[in-house]
Image (cartoon, helix red, strand yellow):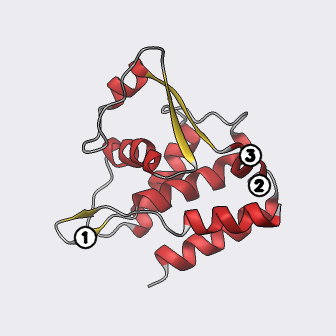
Amino acid sequence: MNSYLAIYTDMLLSLQLGNYKGIVSLSKPLYVLAIIDSIEVIESNRIYIDNLVIEQQFKKLYQRFQDGFAYTRAAYIAPFFHLASSEFYHLIWKDKVKPPSMSSTPSAKYLREHLQYAKLDDELWELLQDDDNREYFRRNIINRYLLK
């Protein structure tokens, strides 16, 4: 599993961050941290848009680290959707749904109606079942994105 640990660490430390009016958005790394911090209450590798545990953890992190942005529900919806631009996170759409463009963020209503769930690569999911691996990822994400 060590090679997977290295591969996923590289992916997590290479997230493409958004930028709004010159302020870098930390939403994607904060969302990943919220998943990591909530992993023990996620029953399977299915992340639903209305998972209140993840959303509340994300909100806490967002309010602490994302200077210049007020928290709104849209702040949570954006990384839930846009993290799919990363290789390790996948949106599973309902049958015959054509996914919207990544150039904008769909509404929570649209996602609830057309999306089944999001999921991580199975190998990453397995790594996150281990406390030491979660702490390793958490520490690396914090060092890379939040300690400046």
Q: Residue at x 68, y 37 (%)?
A: 45
Q: Tell which residue pokes out farthest to the bottom in this image.
A: 148
Give the amino acid at mark 1.
Ile
Q: Which of marks 3 and 1 is in front?
A: 1
The dot on residue 127 is: 2
Give the amino acid at mark 3.
Glu
Q: Which comes sooner in the sequence, label 3 or label 1?
A: 1
For disc 1, the neighbor class at 10 Å (few under 14, some 14 to 19, many from 20) is few
In the image, taking residue 9 as reference, residue 135 lies left or right, namely: right
Badge 1 element: strand
Residue 13: x percent and y percent?
Answer: 54, 69
Q: In the picture, which quadrant includes the C terminus?
A: bottom left
Q: Which comes sooner in the sequence, label 3 or label 2?
A: 3
Badge 3 element: helix
Q: Which is nearer the eye, 115 or 108?
A: 115
The dot on residue 40 is: 3
Whether 8 is drawn above or below 54: the answer is: below
Give the amino acid at mark 2.
Leu
